[in-house]
């Protein structure tokens, strides 16, 4: 059983006896003897063999190593197909959310610019001798000054985002 398992797993991994022997620091004839059932590896070499073949020791010692059947491959294929479909739907959903986010940012920025344009900076006519009015007027002026300078960048980025996230199949 061990000899067949070593040979089958080695071949499945695409290793020659020589390559496996090099990984284990033994001569090729040792691997050949194991595969012919003429000798068995000691416990240290069995662990090293398990690591080299990336296979559990229990599989080497007794569990049968068989090729996956066509039905197993078909089931795996169907599961992968379902997973791919789910990932595709998640990606489409994420793209739609991002697209609508950019549309909302663009709309809010344009709305805010329109409001600022229509209000025409009313704080400029306030009486700044009152400390509370002065603080409020300064805050309003600072907000408007910063927003008017940042708004074009926001618009460019959000319009680029809208273009980049639009559906490609149209």
Image (cartoon, rainbow, N blue to C red):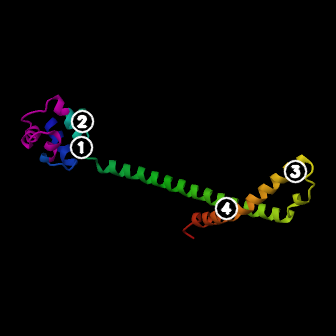
Res 105 → quadrant: bottom right
List the residue tagged with mark 1: 66
Label 4 SS: helix
Q: Are marks 2 and 1 in contact (CB under 8 Å)?
A: no
List the residue tagged with mark 2: 59
Which residues lie in the magenta part?
A: 19-46
Position of residue 77 relative to residue 164, above or below, is above
List the residue tagged with mark 4: 154
The image's mark for residue 2 is none
Sequence-wise first label, 2 or 1: 2
Task: Give the residue at x 6% y 42%.
Answer: 29
Task: Give the residue at x 82% y 53%.
Answer: 138
Q: How many other residues sit within 10 Å of disc 2, few (<14), some (14-19) or many (≥20)?
A: some
Label 1 SS: loop
Q: Which is in the foreground here, disc 3 or disc 1?
A: 3
| Alpha carbon distance from label 4 to label 2 | 60 Å
Sequence-wise first label, 3 or 4: 3
Residue 153 percent location from the top left of the image: 66, 63
The residue lying toward the viewer, choosing from 128 and 43, is 128
Residue 61 percent location from the top left of the image: 20, 33
Sequence-wise first label, 4 or 2: 2
Task: Name the residue at the front extreme.
Answer: 129
């Amino acid at each position: 059983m061990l000899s067949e398992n070593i040979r089958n797993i080695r071949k499945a991994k695409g290793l020659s006896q020589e390559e496996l022997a090099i990984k284990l620091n033994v001569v090729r004839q040792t691997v050949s003897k194991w595969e012919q059932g003429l000798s068995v590896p000691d416990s240290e070499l069995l662990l090293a063999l398990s690591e080299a073949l990336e296979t559990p020791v229990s599989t080497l010692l007794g569990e049968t190593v068989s090729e996956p059947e066509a039905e197993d491959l078909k089931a795996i294929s169907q599961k992968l197909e379902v997973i791919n479909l789910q990932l595709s739907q998640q990606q489409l959903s994420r793209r739609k959310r991002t697209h609508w986010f950019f549309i909302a940012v663009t709309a809010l920025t344009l709305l805010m610019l329109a409001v600022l344009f229509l209000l025409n900076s009313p704080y400029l006519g306030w009486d700044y001798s009152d400390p509370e009015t002065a603080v409020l007027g300064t805050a309003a002026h600072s907000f408007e000054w910063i927003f008017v300078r940042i708004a074009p960048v926001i618009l460019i980025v959000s319009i680029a985002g809208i273009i980049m996230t639009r559906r490609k199949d149209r």
